[in-house]
Image (cartoon, helix red, strand yellow):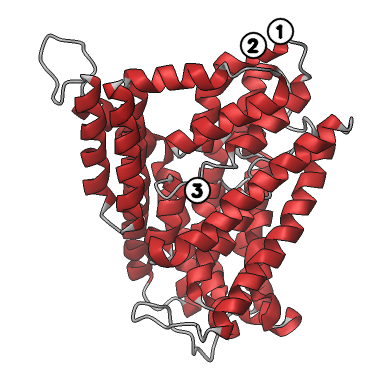
Amino acid sequence: MLSLVGLGCGLALLIVLAMRGVNLFIATPLCAAIVALTSGLPLLPVEGQSATDLVSTYMQGFAGFVSSWFFMFLLGSIFGKLMEDTGAAESVARWVVDRIGVRHAAFAVVAACVVLTYGGVSLFVVAFSVYPTALSLFRAADLPRRFIPAALGFGSITITMTAAGSPEIQNWIPIKFLHTSPWAGWQASLVAAIVMAALGQWWLNSMIRRAKARGERFETRENDPVSSRSHLPSPLLSLVPLLVVLALSFLLHERYHTGALIIALFAGCVATAALGWRYLAQPGHALAEGSTGALIAIGNTAAVVGFGAVAKAAPAFAETVTWITHLPGGGIVNAAIAVSLIAAMTGSASGGQAIALPILAPLYLAQGVDPGQLHRSVALASGALDAMPHNGYIVTTIRAICGDTHQAAYWPMAAMTMAVPTLGLIVALACFALGLD
């Protein structure tokens, strides 16, 4: 019982601290210590003993994430900085505004994220690539910049992350356990995606309109890239690096998996520098700024992963997972509820699937549940409630990339990345109930 109380208190405190803007390098070890103390886990490793301890478990989660994602974060951040410093991002932004008008600036940001994530660029680094363009678009349209994280999240982790055919890992994890294909349940997935796209864009535009009616406008910051350049690369030339990243990640994904993203982002960096060299005044500065940004971003995310590793080691966590995955009833609805709740606890869509599926897959397949429907339900459910304030993607996008605060940016982002995906899950479940696979 004490372990359960500690787990709940540690998670609740982490959410509160994240919302208040407390540094995650301080908040996550503190909250992990609460979980460890109430769960009987030693705080420090003891030589000769193999018992799970706070420091070792936290650092295994922290270092494991850095080991897996460092080069993607590094190259993604440098790519975004080069797009910014060469003026390529602003050139694309001006072209978009001229063609579709400032009223559709938010839609342009969402569309760019949709194309990149569905093309194979990891959602963890899409924000790095699109943020400079988003900033230029919102500046030109005079939209409140606190909605940029919501637009980035809506395009990256709502419509495409768990859709049929998506190359994101959240769509591929179920394949291992259900022996399905990434296109499982594509018809219901398509209907859900259309509903999410329409409702989400309407809701995002409505929130921005209400904010502008209250007098909110774009606020320029001291460290913003220069927006008054008279000489910019051509828009078509500026699109080439984005197309390079998209094409290579799509073509190489099946063969190299996450390695394809490293190749694609490196090629994107080279293409950006080569095509925009005459506009790049300080290449060394761009590399240094991009590298520093990557370290901050991956550090914030890894800190949350470290807390999650300690939480998983608590006895109460295993008991809670067992209870959730054995709720009364059966079928895809119960599976979706179980994965949603575990993803909310861990603050991770992929983590929710990885924990739940080894238990759920044999349980529900034995009941005769259709594997394709289960695949799509689990995938969509993992992205419904995972975007808690301490979620790694949320923290990285709001703080490290956009330089904003949870108080200002989280609630619009939660509407896009929690409420809208939950509706999409409900739509997909309704489609399955009506016999549409």
| Residue nearest the observer in this picture, 93 or 279 | 93
Which residue sits at x=21%, y=13%?
51
Q: Position of residue 24 (x, y in %)?
A: 28, 49
Q: Amino acid at mark 2?
A: Leu
Q: Distance of mark 2 from mark 3, alpha carbons?
A: 32 Å
* Element type at mark 3: helix
Mark 2 vs mark 3: give the one in front.
Answer: 2
Q: Quadrant of the N terminus?
A: top left
The answer to whether residue 129 shows anywhere in this view is: no
Residue found at x 70% / y 28%:
333
Q: Residue at 59% across / 36% down in the picture?
A: 382
Q: Which amino acid, by three-letter code, is at mark 1?
A: Ala
- Label 1 secondary element: loop
Checking the image for residue 366, the label placed there is 1
Question: Is residue 227 or residue 193 the one in the foreground?
Answer: 193
Label 1–label 2 contact, CB within 8 A: yes
Query: For the residues carrying marks 1 and 3, which lies nearer the camera in this image?
Result: 1
**Residue with the mark numbered 3:** 124
Query: Which badge, 1 or 3, comes first in the chain's sequence?
Result: 3
Which picture quadrant has residue 43? top left
Q: Give the position of the C terminus as an image quadrant.
A: top right
* Mark number, residue 363: 2
Q: Residues within 10 Å of mark 2 (few under 14, many from 20)?
A: some
